[in-house]
Amino acid sequence: MLLQETPHLLPDLEICELGCDELAGLTPQLEAFLIRHGTAPLSYHPAWLTVLNRGLKHHPFCLVARQDGQVRGYLSLAHLRSRLFGRFLVSLPYLNYGGVVSDSKHVSCLLIDRAVELAKRFDVRYLELRNETAVEHPQLTHQTTQKVHMRLDLPMSPEELWSRLPSKVRNQIRKGQKCGLTVAWGGEPLLPEFYDVFSRNMRDLGTPVYSRSLFLEMLRQFPDRVEICVIRDEAQTLATAILLHGWGVSEVPSASSLRRYNHTNANMLLYWNLLERSIQRGQTEFDFGRSTPDSNTFRFKKQWGANPASAVWQYHVRDGNMTDMRPDNPRYQRLIRLWQRMPVNLTRLIGPLIVRGIP
């Protein structure tokens, strides 16, 4: 994420490597740097390092570039270590956004230089930067652009958004409302409902589920910017999502619904409420997350008016291939089918131990 370009750097620029504890005192200054030019997703906030450390037991740290005591850029990184998969350096796991936040291309390159040095020091398989646009650097020799961010420009009012939606979408939302479904918003008290639906959906997809503690740490670290939305039919939770509110941007890193209730259109009602909530908070953009063009999720997001935006994940590969860990790798298909047949409670027990090592 390149902020407004600044003039040529003076020679007294320093780059510091800070852990979570050391970073705490500098976080307000880093946040101010992040938002000084306006719109920014919450995913870029350096406090995610604390969330990943406590919620996934990762080993995160931040590279901070400073000049005359002023922040000129930073790069949040997490060191993943797993006996199953090996070691990786990622900015950042779980989130769709990452990479350098800086005010010049020169600072970006210096931060990446240091990250490449760390990749060698930690002997990782690869360094992964989840950029929106490509950063020119000789050590970033591989990239993937197979997915795109799906973003929607938000109007001033829910009524204006409603008028822009296709009639089919409006009818599906109305069906959910006519089914008597209710909507609840909140924080930690709604976490058990969220996790029940989320973990079941992940099992059905054949994907190891994240730990409940990851979402608990999100809610605790960002109490005013992270909330849960739940759609219920009386006592039964049908659909739910985690909504992040950044500066002008709301994003949905995790959303799930129970397939056997698809006929209620609970998922459509869920997303309408996510969009409505974002407008009510004064946001100007809604990020549905990444999708593969022409996939089912891409078409679902497209029907709301979302448009694709670039997502360029760049790599410094030291061992193997960056595609080895992708879920669409053919060697994982049998494991995915086995996972889909496992009891949900078992996937909740062993899934977090597996997924914490997957970049």
Image: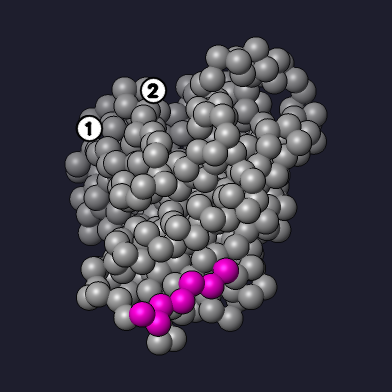
Number of the label disc, if any, that sits on residue 296: 2
Give the percent coordinates (x, y) of residue 123: 64, 46
Give the residue type at disc 2. Asn
Relative to 243, residue 203 above or below = above
Give the residue type at disc 1. Pro
Number of the label disc, if any, that sits on residue 166: 1
Q: Residue at 62% x, 44% y: name it.
A: 124
Give the percent coordinates (x, y) of residue 280: 35, 61
The quadrant of the picture occupied by the C terminus is top right
Camera-nearest residue between 318 and 38: 318
The quadrant of the picture occupied by the N terminus is bottom left
Q: Secondary structure at mark 2?
A: helix
**Chain-order first, disc 1 or disc 2:** 1
Give the percent coordinates (x, y) of residue 223: 57, 66
Q: Residue at 27% x, 38% y: name it.
A: 308
Measure how far apart labels 1 and 2 are at the Cα level: 18 Å
Residue 82 makes an appearance in the image: yes
Relative to 343, residue 78 above or below = below
Counting other residues with Cα less than 10 Å from the Cα at mark 2, is it few (<14), some (14-19), or many (20 or more)? few
Number of the label disc, if any, that sits on residue 5: none
- Asked whether 80 falls inside the magenta stretch, the response is no
The colour scheme used to paint the residues is one colour
Highlighted magenta segment, given as a residue range: 11-17
The image quadrant that residue 100 belongs to is bottom left
Camera-nearest residue between 352 and 136: 136
Give the percent coordinates (x, y) of residue 256: 54, 35
